[in-house]
Amino acid sequence: MHLLKLHIQKRLTLHFKSTSPLQLLSYSLDMSWLLLIFLMAPAVLMAERCHPNDKAAILKFKNSFSNGRELLPMWTPDRDCCDIFDCDEATNRIIDFSLTYSNLAGTIPDSIGNLTYLKTLRLHKMPFLIGEIPLAVTRLKYVTFFDISWTNVSGRVPSFLSKLQSVMILDLSFNNLSGPIPSSLATLPNMIGLDLSRNRLDGSIPESFGHIASPALQGLVLSHNMLSGEIPTSLGKMKIYRIDVSRNNLSGDASMLFGSSKNTTVIDISRNNFDFDLSRVSFMVDTLVTLDISHNKIYGEIPSQILEAYMLQSLNVSYNRLCGTIPSPWKLKLAIEAAAWWCRGHANGDKDHGYDDVSPVLASLEGDGDDDDGDYDFAPAA
């Protein structure tokens, strides 16, 4: 190595001895440019990607919370926001703003609307997030995944959410939202899944939900609210993979949700006041995975066609007014409470007969617990 160094030095000395002053000057300038480029390279490589508008928006978001500085110490003016959030490679704009399991205390600030290139907005499991959903979110023209869930956000479900024309998943579950469901949500043209469960919503299911604009709708979850009235007949025309309206005060006929031509995988209408003849229902035998009609006033017999539902994994028909012969043998183990038919001893099967000395039917594959965690997969079953 030492000999090689001496050799290089000797060659350079001979080169400079045979070089004119003008050539030496040119060589010196070339070396200066190379040195300058070398010194600037790290600065170029480390140049901040974060767009100034986005940086201003997230800093304003942080400062709007009383404990923002404490809980978001990495959000500083000298920090590249693209090191914190997912940024688009071409525009360097923030496209994913996700905050989960955070104790930030306060309302959703209007500055969230300044992140105008967002595709994902997720504020999840933030128990001290309060107040109403701000109008500023309507500036998020590109958002496809809109999730404000498991918070203490209150007020009404805003009708202005229908302006989010790119949204595919709208999840407002596990909040303190109240009032009616805005009919305008049915106009969202790209919606795949809508989850409004676990709130305090009242009124009826909008008639417009039977004419939802999106041809790709796969999941509709309205459970654990205070909805009342009848299900719109038009909703039966929708081909939805999952529908859950359980634990409301809905009444009347829900048979339109069934049908052999549908590709529904999950139907949960439990704990309502539905009143219809199950004998007249035809099932989607090729796709049905979960069926829960428990705790209603449904009467008639369990159709033997249910035996053809080879995908069926969970069935609960308990606490209704069912009677007749139990279809058997069941493909899966079916726990039936012995002699627990509503119309036991009443050959006429009068659906208006009182309970008296008989119990409602108990038929369940998975028990009657309430152990769902509120996480729904809107994709069709494999």
Image (cartoon, grey):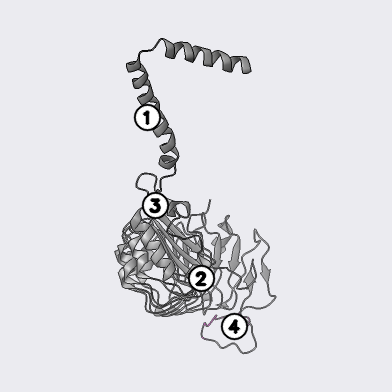
Q: Real-space Cα distance between discs 3 and 1?
A: 29 Å
Which stretch is magenta?
342-352
What SS does tag 1 mark?
A: helix
Q: Label 4, on which residue? A: 346
Of the residues shown, which amino acid type is indicated by label 2? Met
How packed mark 1 is, by other alpha carbons closer than 10 Å (few <14, some 14-19, many 20 or more), is few
Side (left or right) of 188 relative to 103: left
Of residues 277 and 256, the one nearer the viewer is: 256
Of residues 375 and 84, the one nearer the viewer is: 84
Q: Position of residue 275 (x, y in %)?
A: 47, 78
Q: Is residue 115 visible?
A: yes
Of the residues shown, which amino acid type is indicated by label 1? Trp
Q: Label 1, on which residue? A: 33
Depth check, mark 3 against mark 2: the one in front is 3
Earlier in the chain: of badge 2 and badge 1, it is 1
Side (left or right) of 24 relative to 269: left
Of the residues shown, which amino acid type is indicated by label 3? Cys
Q: Label 2, on which residue? A: 126
Earlier in the chain: of badge 3 and badge 1, it is 1
Q: Real-space Cα distance between discs 4 and 1?
A: 101 Å
Depth check, mark 4 against mark 1: the one in front is 1
How packed mark 3 is, by other alpha carbons closer than 10 Å (few <14, some 14-19, many 20 or more), is many
Earlier in the chain: of badge 4 and badge 3, it is 3
How packed mark 2 is, by other alpha carbons closer than 10 Å (few <14, some 14-19, many 20 or more), is many
